[in-house]
Amino acid sequence: MSALRVLFIGGSGIISSACCRVAVQRGVDLYALNRGATQVRPLPAEMTILHGDIRDPASVQQALRGQSSTWW
């Protein structure tokens, strides 16, 4: 069975950064759509970071290009 594949929007907030660490520890294939605007709480190296801003549809489309269409 393949790992659960999850996309977080953001991921570097107080709560979501903790969720990212737990998800990676549990073997989740984790992705984050993130602007890369802060390094206060770095994202785990084991996850995939897709650079984009959820408020900018064009950047989201660009960030998700090449990813599985089952996400949306």
Image (cartoon, grey):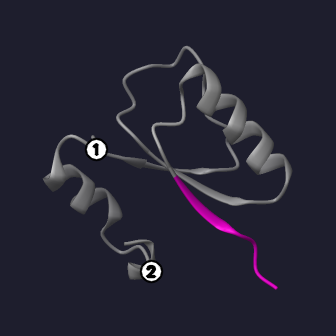
Q: Position of residue 4 (x, y in %)?
A: 70, 69
As for residue 23 lying within the magenta part, the answer is no
Q: Residue at x 27, y 40 (%)?
A: 53
Q: Are marks 2 and 1 in contact (CB under 8 Å)?
A: no
In the figure, residue 41 lies in which quadrant? top right
The amino acid type, in three-letter code, at marker 2 is Thr
The amino acid type, in three-letter code, at marker 1 is Ile
Image: magenta residue range: 1-7
CA–CA distance in space, label 2 to label 1:
18 Å
Horizontal side, residue 68 vs residue 31: left or right = left
Between disc 2 and disc 1, whose residue precedes?
1
Against 27, is 12 above or below? above
Q: Residue at x 17, y 44 (%)?
A: 56
In the figure, residue 67 lies in which quadrant? bottom left
Horizontal side, residue 45 vs residue 27: left or right = left
Disc sitting over residue 27 in the figure: none
Against 40, is 54 above or below? below
Of residue 15 and residue 27, the one placed in the foreground of this image is 15
Horizontal side, residue 2 vs residue 59: left or right = right
> Quarter holding the C terminus?
bottom left
Q: Secondary structure at mark 1?
A: loop
Q: Residues within 10 Å of mark 1 (few under 14, many from 20)?
A: some
Against 28, is 49 above or below? above
Horizontal side, residue 50 vs residue 47: left or right = left
Q: Position of residue 64 (x, y in %)?
A: 34, 64
Of residue 61 and residue 70, the one placed in the foreground of this image is 70
Residue denoted by label 1: 54
> Quarter holding the N terminus?
bottom right
Q: Residues within 10 Å of mark 2 (few under 14, many from 20)?
A: few
Residue denoted by label 2: 70
Q: Residue at x 60, y 26 (%)?
A: 42
